[in-house]
Image (cartoon, helix red, strand yellow):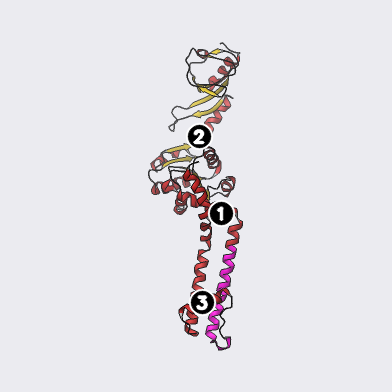
């Protein structure tokens, strides 16, 4: 963990609570107006100087009772005005107490406040915007890799699923929330909203705030790839299309570990994993597949030739057509030619 990250961890515990207290600033402002109104009343009816009038106004609003003019000598208009201000003050007290209690009791408020403070002070971090398992999985993976990131989501489910304190519960279409996530100083952003229209809108807003930002968009409709690129997306990932291709490949062979694909979908390559159960020469494998790595005892060996002989206990990783994976399995298991 970097020194900057450590300092942010410490500072957010100290400073972030002020973000929570901002929720009661409007009530405090109105309460100050009530005090000022009382001061005006005392200046006009009790003929007090302004300092004394403000002191008296605070006493009346807080009901401390240190200043109590002779009620029998007070004009009816003054009494009526003071009654109105006291009722307003009581209502404001109730609102302030309710806001403070709700904020302090709900952990989500503190979690959101900390994330907003952290996001606005981070640099060269990654911002994840959206909903669903894509955002949750990406955030969890970045946490394991130790990469600085902030999640901005409108989903309570995503907010609660991520245990870390780097999640903002907000509206990605609101520029204030995008600023809280640190879009102006981020290095990359991943956008995966519940529908592609909202993802496109967020992409446009993000590009307006920080045009050089590396922008990755996850879309459901592959037909919109060019639209997102025009909007400023650097990479557009057709999520359902990718899942469909992996699923189709997996249905052909049990050895599928993933798919390497181009955004233009011109040359998809399926990754296959095979356990070696007998000694076999690499040259025995179908020429249409490409050996990538030989794994032995957890070590990766990318250095080999066509004359290399595979040994039992090793794992071979290849690229190729999954239609050929069955024959590869037979060769490496001893059921085919060696």
Question: Residue 329 placed where, x, y %?
Answer: 58, 18
- From the viewer's perspective, is residue 190 above or below residue 112? above
Marks 2 and 3, the one that precedes in the sequence: 3
Q: Which residues are magenta?
A: 71-98
- Identify the main secondary structure in magenta: helix
Label 3 neighbour load within 10 Å: few <14, some 14-19, many 20+: some
Q: Residue at x 53, y 34 (%)?
A: 243
Q: Give SS at disc 2.
A: helix
* 327 drawn magenta: no
The residue singled out by tag 1 in the image is: 110
Q: From the viewer's perspective, is the residue at label 2 or at label 3 nearer?
A: 3
Q: Quadrant of residue 229?
A: top left
Q: From the viewer's perspective, is the residue at label 1 or at label 3 nearer?
A: 3
The residue singled out by tag 2 in the image is: 241
The residue singled out by tag 3 in the image is: 55
Real-space CA distance between mark 1 and mark 3, rounded to the nearest whole angstrom: 35 Å
Q: Give SS at disc 3.
A: helix
Residue 277 appears in the rendering: yes
Q: From the viewer's perspective, is the residue at label 2 or at label 1 nearer?
A: 1
Q: Is residue 277 left or right of residue 284?
A: right
Q: Residue at x 51, y 78 (%)?
A: 38
Question: Residue 206 placed where, x, y %?
Answer: 42, 47
- From the viewer's perspective, is residue 107 above or below residue 332? below
Q: Nearer the viewer, residue 226 or 282?
A: 282
Marks 1 & 3, CB-CB < 8 Å contact: no
Q: Nearer the viewer, residue 64 or 141?
A: 64
Real-space CA distance between mark 2 and mark 3, rounded to the nearest whole angstrom: 70 Å
Q: Nearer the viewer, residue 188 or 62?
A: 62
Of all residues, the one furthest to the bottom in this rendering is: 73
Real-space CA distance between mark 2 and mark 1, rounded to the nearest whole angstrom: 38 Å
């Amino acid at each position: 963990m970097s020194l900057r990250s450590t300092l942010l961890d410490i500072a957010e515990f100290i400073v972030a609570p002020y973000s929570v207290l901002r929720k009661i600033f409007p009530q405090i402002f109105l309460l100050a107006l009530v005090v000022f109104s009382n001061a005006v009343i005392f200046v006009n009816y009790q003929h007090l100087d302004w300092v004394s009038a403000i002191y008296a106004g605070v006493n009346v609003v807080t009901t401390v009772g240190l200043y109590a003019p002779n009620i029998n000598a007070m004009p009816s208009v003054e009494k009526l005005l003071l009654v109105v201000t006291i009722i307003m003050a009581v209502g404001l007290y109730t609102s302030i107490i309710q806001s403070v209690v709700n904020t302090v009791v709900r952990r989500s408020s503190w979690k959101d406040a900390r994330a907003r403070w952290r996001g606005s002070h981070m640099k060269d971090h990654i911002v994840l915007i959206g909903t669903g398992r894509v955002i949750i999985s990406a955030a969890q993976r970045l946490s394991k890799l130790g990469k600085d990131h902030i999640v901005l989501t409108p989903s309570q489910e995503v907010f609660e699923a991520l245990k870390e304190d780097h999640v903002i519960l907000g509206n990605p279409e609101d520029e204030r929330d995008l600023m809280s996530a640190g879009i102006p100083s981020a290095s990359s952003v991943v956008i995966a909203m519940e529908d592609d229209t909202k993802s496109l809108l967020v992409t446009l807003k993000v590009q307006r705030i920080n045009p050089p930002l590396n922008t990755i968009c996850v879309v459901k409709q592959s037909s919109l790839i060019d639209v997102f690129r025009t909007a400023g997306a650097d990479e557009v990932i057709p999520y359902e299309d990718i899942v469909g291709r992996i699923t189709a490949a997996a249905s052909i062979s049990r050895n599928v570990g993933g798919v390497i694909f181009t955004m233009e979908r011109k040359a998809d390559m399926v990754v296959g994993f095979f356990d070696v159960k007998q000694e076999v020469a690499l040259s025995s494998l179908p020429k249409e597949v490409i050996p990538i790595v030989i794994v032995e005892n957890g070590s990766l060996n990318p250095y080999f030739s066509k004359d290399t002989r595979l040994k039992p206990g090793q794992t071979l990783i290849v690229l190729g057509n999954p239609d050929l994976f069955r024959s590869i399995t037979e060769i490496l298991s001893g059921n085919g030619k060696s």
